[in-house]
Amino acid sequence: MVHVGIGYDVHELVEGRRLVLGGVEIPHPKGLDGHSDADALMHAITDAVLGAIGEVDIGHLFPNTDPTWKNAPSRIFLEEAARRVQARGGRIVNIDASLIAERPKIFPHLAAMKTNIAAALGLAERKVGVKATTNERLGFVGREEGIAAMAVAAVELPED
Ligand code: MG
């Protein structure tokens, strides 16, 4: 049986932080604020995978009050979500995700992001979709106050 999950995340763009999306550090005057490396794309995908197997969300698994996750690479969260799928006897069928960012240009980095996400989840790269769009200058994303990401995951689980 294929189960689907959805994930959504937003982080604020601030000065003095690195911009890391899909595990790729992108040169930009601002970076995403957060407890970990604030990789909104990996966070949204983590939540999509966790949602597909009916587990609690990333914020509960990896609380931002826990110093363990301070500046942690978000690949760890993806790896844990994949481990939980495996523990349930399941397998991830595919992932699809969209980044919503006004700037910087995301397209040149999409291939590297896919490589990182596929590696963290133990998936073939062709099973990972990552796309990017602007917000047409509207709202907080349009004002470059933050970057958002959304994702879906399909996970095959044994019947119970
Ligand atoms: Mg987050």
Image (tube, rainbow, N blue to C red):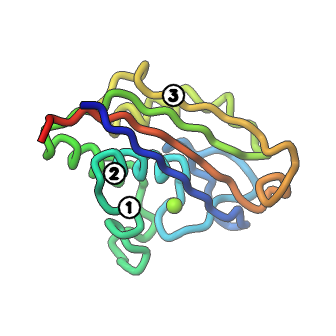
Q: Which residue matches tag 3?
A: 129
- Residue visible at 66% across and 58% down in the picture: 31
- Residue visible at 63% across and 60% down in the picture: 32
Q: Amino acid at mark 2?
A: Leu
Of badges 3 and 2, nearer the viewer stands 2
Q: Amino acid at mark 3?
A: Gly
Q: CA distance from mark 3 to mark 1?
A: 21 Å
Quarter of the image with the C terminus is top left
- Residue visible at 68% across and 29% down in the picture: 107
Quarter of the image with the N terminus is top left
Of badges 3 and 1, nearer the viewer stands 1
Image-based side of 136 in relation to 128, left or right = right
Which structural element holds mark 1? Answer: loop
Q: CA distance from mark 3 to mark 2?
A: 18 Å
Q: Which residue matches tag 1?
A: 57
Q: Nearer the viewer, residue 47 or 30?
A: 47
Q: Amino acid at mark 1?
A: Asp
Image-based side of 45 in relation to 155, left or right = right
Q: Which residue matches tag 2?
A: 50
- Residue visible at 29% across and 57% down in the picture: 55
Q: Is residue 54 above or below residue 113?
A: below
Q: Is residue 11 above or below residue 91?
A: below
Answer few, some or many: residues within 10 Å of disc 1's Cα (few below 14, many 20 plus, some between 14 and 19): some
Q: CA distance from mark 2 to mark 1?
A: 6 Å
